[in-house]
């Protein structure tokens, strides 16, 4: 197995994402940094911080020139010094090249370039999440009245509906999508603060320059230095982790429902076994669960505060973690849609589970029916005794209750409570969120 399964030739089909992966290549990073350098020069030229002709020249050159990532690494720890040197060499115009990277620091360039790429990552993920949400809305509505056993602590509890279970998958997805616009507004910010956050070499009005750079790049103006304030990166990582958690919930419940001893859910195109021809392994749901277990540890590692005005170790940690976390979230979002499209409920199996165990899933409703005449504690005790009898004799519990308490009005055993309403409420909310 390779160091990173996300780009392993053998395992990337499980965990990787080609579109997001391209945004985290060295080539993509260099292109993003060159865009930042060129745009910075342009706004500096327009503001009179550097000669306007040099700003325009550097901006145009950043769009046209190519710099090979090979050879940019080294003992500096950051690649910007080598990139600036290579860029200047390719320009072959020292009268203009001297103004490249004027007054900024490496972290300004790399952080801003990262946010340009994260903007694209979020756009890709958003489209996939909306696809998953649309499928969840359709399933919740179509299965709102499909009876099934709700389970708590791994045990069949009371009657519910499959649509309500789908809604329990969908509400967290909807919440993640609702958090996306505020996240973009805060997290996707330019960085322009100079060597130690003082912006001392960025002209007479560094704040106006930062605002101009933000507008030119389509990013947020943070209003201050965020070299050591990593709340933006933390919020991005926590959003990505929350997305993976949504996938983990869906994957876990589908794996349980598709178990051969439960059989309430079927997955088209499930994975096969190398030695057991009868098996259809829930590979997609398993990957969703694995990604949901991977993501939290990555996100929490980014919550450590950065020290002093800038913190190299904390910054380097982000390089190790954020790309993989973005890949995990992007893959999870794609898999959610794929798994949900392949999912089919087995309504007969669900109905059979409701009446299994001699009708004991109706114990709660039966106990409340008895409580109207004898009080709640006595009703619970009576039902417990009758439930034990049902288990011992194989008799249907509602029949035992009717025989032992003939004067009690029996409840509607087909009553699913709020489950159908909850399913339709979610479907309505999800479709409203998907409107243009």
Image: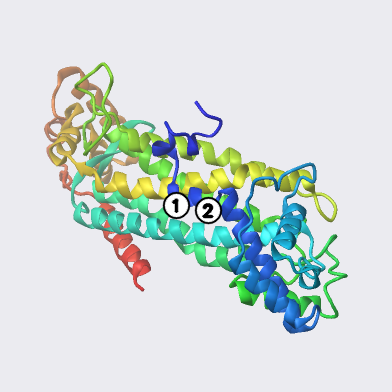
The quadrant of the image that shows the C terminus is bottom left
Residue farthest toward the front in the current orientation of the protein: 92
- Colouring style: rainbow
How far apart are the two marked residues, 1 and 2, measured between alpha carbons? 7 Å
Image position of 401 with respect to 333: above or below: above
* Count of residue discs: 2
Q: Position of residue 125 (x, y in %)?
A: 44, 56
Q: Left or right of 393: which side holds 429?
A: right
Q: Position of residue 281 (x, y in %)?
A: 29, 29
Give the quarter of the image for residue 257: top left
> Are the residues at dot 1 and dot 2 in contact (C-beta closer than 8 Å)?
yes
Q: Nearer the viewer, residue 240 or 361?
A: 240
Q: Left or right of 234: which side holds 159?
A: left
**Residue 236 in view here:** yes
Q: Which mark is residue 411?
A: none
Is disc 2 surrounded by few (<14), some (14 to 19) or many (20+) residues within 10 Å?
Answer: some
Image position of 434 with respect to 234: above or below: below
Give the labeled residue for mark 1. Answer: 19
Give the labeled residue for mark 2. Answer: 23
Residue at horizontal 24 percent and vertical 53 percent from the top: 139
Is disc 1 surrounded by few (<14), some (14 to 19) or many (20+) residues within 10 Å?
Answer: few
Q: Nearer the viewer, residue 88 or 295?
A: 88
**Residue 401 in view here:** no
Residue at horizontal 79 percent and vertical 80 percent from the top: 51
Q: Position of residue 32 (x, y in %)?
A: 61, 60
Q: Nearer the viewer, residue 320 or 367?
A: 320
Q: Secondary structure at mark 1?
A: helix
Residue at horizontal 33 percent and vertical 57 percent from the top: 131
Q: Secondary structure at mark 2?
A: helix
Give the quarter of the image for residue 265: top left
Q: Position of residue 5 (x, y in %)?
A: 49, 34
């Amino acid at each position: 197995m390779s160091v990173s399964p996300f780009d392993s030739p053998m395992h990337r089909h499980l965990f990787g994402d080609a579109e997001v992966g391209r945004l985290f290549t060295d080539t993509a990073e260099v292109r993003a940094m060159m865009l930042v350098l060129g745009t910075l020069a342009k706004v500096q030229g327009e503001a009179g911080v550097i000669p306007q002709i040099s700003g325009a020249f550097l901006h145009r050159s950043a769009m046209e020139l190519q710099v090979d990532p090979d050879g940019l690494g080294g003992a500096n720890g950051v690649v910007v010094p080598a990139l600036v040197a290579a860029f200047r060499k390719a320009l072959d115009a020292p009268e203009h090249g001297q103004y490249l990277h004027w007054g900024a620091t490496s972290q300004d360039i790399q952080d801003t370039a990262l946010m340009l790429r994260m903007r694209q990552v979020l756009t890709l993920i958003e489209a996939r999440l909306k696809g998953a949400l649309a499928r969840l809305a359709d399933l919740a509505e179509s299965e709102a009245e499909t009876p099934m056993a709700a389970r708590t602590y791994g045990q069949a509890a009371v009657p519910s509906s499959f649509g309500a279970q789908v809604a329990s998958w969908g509400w967290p997805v909807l919440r993640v999508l609702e958090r996306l616009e505020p996240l973009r507004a805060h997290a996707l910010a330019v960085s322009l603060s100079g060597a130690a956050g003082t912006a001392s070499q960025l002209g007479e009005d560094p704040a106006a320059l930062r605002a101009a750079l933000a507008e030119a790049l389509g990013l947020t103006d943070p209003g201050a230095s965020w070299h050591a304030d990593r709340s933006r990166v933390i919020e991005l990582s926590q959003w990505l982790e929350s997305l993976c958690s949504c996938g983990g919930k869906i994957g876990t419940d589908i794996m349980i429902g598709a178990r051969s001893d439960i059989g309430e859910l079927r997955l088209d195109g499930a994975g096969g076994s190398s030695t057991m021809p009868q098996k259809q392994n829930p590979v997609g749901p398993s990957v969703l669960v694995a990604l949901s277990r991977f993501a939290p540890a990555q996100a929490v590692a980014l919550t450590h505060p950065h020290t002093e005005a800038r913190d190299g170790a904390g910054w380097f940690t982000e390089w190790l973690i954020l790309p993989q976390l973005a890949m995990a979230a992007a893959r999870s979002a794609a898999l959610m849609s794929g798994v949900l499209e392949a999912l089919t409920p087995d309504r007969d199996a669900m109905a059979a589970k409701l009446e299994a165990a001699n009708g004991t899933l109706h114990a709660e409703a039966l106990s409340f029916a008895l409580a109207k005449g004898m009080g709640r504690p006595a009703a619970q005790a009576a039902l417990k005794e009758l439930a034990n009898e049902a288990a011992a004799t194989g008799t249907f519990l509602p029949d035992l209750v009717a025989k032992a308490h003939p004067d009690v009005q029996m409840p509607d055993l087909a009553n699913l409570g709020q489950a159908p309403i909850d399913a339709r409420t979610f479907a309505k909310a999800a479709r409203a969120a998907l409107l243009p």
